[in-house]
Image (tube, rainbow, N blue to C red):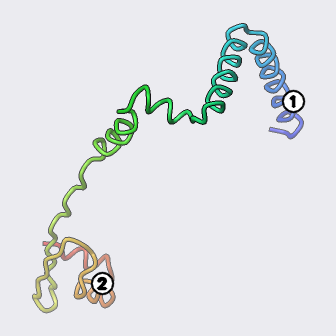
Amino acid sequence: MSRLAEFRQLEQKLAAQLAELEALKGSSELQKEIEFETRLRDLLAKYGFSLRDVINLLDPQSGRRASTPAVAEKAPRRARQLKQYKNPHNGEIIETKGGNHKLLKKWKAQYGADEVESWLA
């Protein structure tokens, strides 16, 4: 797409968004919400409270509920599978659940990782 076509497309999108913004500005519902928010913030400032304080007053369990589902949704990690490698050159066998085994690393350095992976029993 040429830069001019891209510019005109963005210009049209901007004009549409500006029209939508103007329509929202004239909305009586928006005016009511803005007035409510302004009055609420003034009232909170007058008494030295924050929105968090109001939420805790009205619903003390909200702080605990928000963090609990996130922890509950987290699935436990799957246990690593035990792998058994048998070196065909000397018949040595090692069992490991990860790739951080000292002898396995030595074999991979000596024979190559692809070769050693083919030794899985």
Residue 48 vs residue 54: left or right?
right
Is residue 91 positioned above or below 37 on the image? Answer: below
Residue 47 vs residue 61: left or right?
right
Q: Which residue is mark 2?
A: 108
**Disc 1, SS:** helix
How packed mark 2 is, by other alpha carbons closer than 10 Å (few <14, some 14-19, many 20 or more), is some
For the residue pair 96 and 6, the one nearer the viewer reads as 96
Residue 70 vs residue 82: left or right?
right
Q: Please report the residue visible at 78 percent of the width from the left and 15 percent of the height from the top.
A: 25
Q: Which residue is mark 1?
A: 8
Q: From this viewpoint, which residue is outermost toward the front?
A: 47
Q: Position of residue 10 (x, y in %)?
A: 81, 31
Is residue 82 positioned above or below 65 on the image? Answer: below
Q: Please report the residue visible at 82 percent of the width from the left and 29 percent of the height from the top.
A: 9
The answer to which image quadrant residue 92 occupies is bottom left
Which is more foreground, mark 2 or mark 1? 1
Q: In the image, what residue type sits under mark 2?
A: Lys
Which label number is shown at residue 59?
A: none
